Image: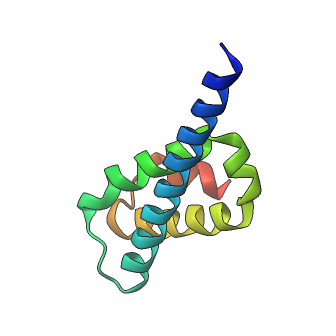
Amino acid sequence: MSHIRKVLKSIITFSQADNAREQLKRLRVKAELNQSTIDDLREWESNLEIIRKSQPFYETTKLLNEKLSNEFLRYLEKHYPGDNRLVNYKR
Protein backbone atom coordinates (compact mmCIF):
# COMPACT_ATOMS: atom_id res chain seq x y z
CA MET A 1 0.00 0.00 0.00
CA SER A 2 1.44 3.35 -0.95
CA HIS A 3 2.16 6.02 1.62
CA ILE A 4 -0.61 8.24 0.23
CA ARG A 5 -3.15 5.42 0.53
CA LYS A 6 -2.08 4.76 4.12
CA VAL A 7 -2.49 8.42 4.99
CA LEU A 8 -5.89 8.60 3.30
CA LYS A 9 -7.01 5.43 5.06
CA SER A 10 -5.97 6.81 8.45
CA ILE A 11 -7.79 10.08 7.77
CA ILE A 12 -10.95 8.22 6.78
CA THR A 13 -10.67 5.93 9.80
CA PHE A 14 -10.18 8.90 12.13
CA SER A 15 -13.18 10.66 10.60
CA GLN A 16 -15.36 7.57 11.03
CA ALA A 17 -14.19 7.15 14.61
CA ASP A 18 -14.85 10.80 15.39
CA ASN A 19 -18.36 10.50 13.95
CA ALA A 20 -18.96 7.30 15.93
CA ARG A 21 -17.80 9.05 19.11
CA GLU A 22 -20.30 11.84 18.52
CA GLN A 23 -23.09 9.32 17.92
CA LEU A 24 -22.19 7.50 21.14
CA LYS A 25 -22.25 10.76 23.07
CA ARG A 26 -25.74 11.41 21.68
CA LEU A 27 -26.85 7.92 22.72
CA ARG A 28 -25.33 8.45 26.18
CA VAL A 29 -27.27 11.68 26.66
CA LYS A 30 -30.41 10.00 25.39
CA ALA A 31 -29.94 7.23 27.96
CA GLU A 32 -29.20 9.70 30.76
CA LEU A 33 -32.43 11.53 29.96
CA ASN A 34 -34.25 8.19 30.13
CA GLN A 35 -35.18 8.49 26.44
CA SER A 36 -33.36 5.41 25.18
CA THR A 37 -35.27 2.62 23.49
CA ILE A 38 -34.61 -1.00 22.66
CA ASP A 39 -34.21 0.10 19.04
CA ASP A 40 -30.96 1.91 19.90
CA LEU A 41 -29.00 -1.34 20.32
CA ARG A 42 -27.76 -1.65 16.74
CA GLU A 43 -26.53 1.95 16.79
CA TRP A 44 -24.67 1.40 20.08
CA GLU A 45 -23.05 -1.76 18.77
CA SER A 46 -21.99 -0.42 15.38
CA ASN A 47 -20.51 2.79 16.77
CA LEU A 48 -18.65 1.01 19.59
CA GLU A 49 -17.19 -1.38 17.00
CA ILE A 50 -15.96 1.51 14.84
CA ILE A 51 -14.22 3.04 17.86
CA ARG A 52 -12.63 -0.27 18.85
CA LYS A 53 -11.34 -0.90 15.32
CA SER A 54 -9.62 2.47 15.12
CA GLN A 55 -6.96 1.63 17.69
CA PRO A 56 -5.06 4.98 17.68
CA PHE A 57 -8.30 6.89 18.18
CA TYR A 58 -9.40 4.42 20.84
CA GLU A 59 -6.16 4.80 22.79
CA THR A 60 -6.21 8.61 22.73
CA THR A 61 -9.75 8.74 24.06
CA LYS A 62 -9.58 5.79 26.46
CA LEU A 63 -11.32 7.54 29.37
CA LEU A 64 -14.20 8.66 27.17
CA ASN A 65 -14.51 5.15 25.77
CA GLU A 66 -14.70 3.70 29.28
CA LYS A 67 -17.52 6.12 30.11
CA LEU A 68 -19.34 5.20 26.90
CA SER A 69 -18.87 1.48 27.57
CA ASN A 70 -20.28 1.91 31.07
CA GLU A 71 -23.26 3.80 29.69
CA PHE A 72 -23.77 1.03 27.13
CA LEU A 73 -23.86 -1.49 29.98
CA ARG A 74 -26.52 0.57 31.77
CA TYR A 75 -28.44 0.68 28.49
CA LEU A 76 -28.25 -3.11 28.20
CA GLU A 77 -29.33 -3.55 31.82
CA LYS A 78 -32.39 -1.41 31.17
CA HIS A 79 -33.51 -2.74 27.79
CA TYR A 80 -31.82 -6.17 27.52
CA PRO A 81 -31.36 -7.50 31.09
CA GLY A 82 -30.70 -11.05 29.86
CA ASP A 83 -27.95 -10.07 27.40
CA ASN A 84 -24.86 -12.30 27.70
CA ARG A 85 -22.53 -9.30 27.50
CA LEU A 86 -23.72 -8.20 30.94
CA VAL A 87 -22.46 -11.46 32.44
CA ASN A 88 -19.06 -11.05 30.73
CA TYR A 89 -18.62 -7.46 31.91
CA LYS A 90 -19.58 -8.21 35.51
CA ARG A 91 -16.90 -10.86 35.97
Residue 44 vertical placement versus 10 (above, below): below
Residue 89 falls left or right of residue 15: right
Q: Residue furthest top?
A: 1
Residue 36 vertical placement versus 51 (above, below): below
Residue 45 vertical placement versus 35 (above, below): above
49 vs 91, nearest the viewer: 49
Residue 68 vertical placement versus 18 (above, below): below
Question: Residue 45: image x %, image y %?
Answer: 42, 49
Residue at 63% across, 36% down? 10
Residue at 53% across, 39% down? 12
Q: Residue furthest front?
A: 4
Question: Residue 77: image x %, image y %?
Answer: 43, 66
57 vs 74, nearest the viewer: 57
Question: Residue 41: image x %, image y %?
Answer: 34, 55
Which of the 4 image quarters holds residue 70? bottom right
Residue 57 falls left or right of residue 45: right
Which of the 4 image quarters holds residue 32? bottom left
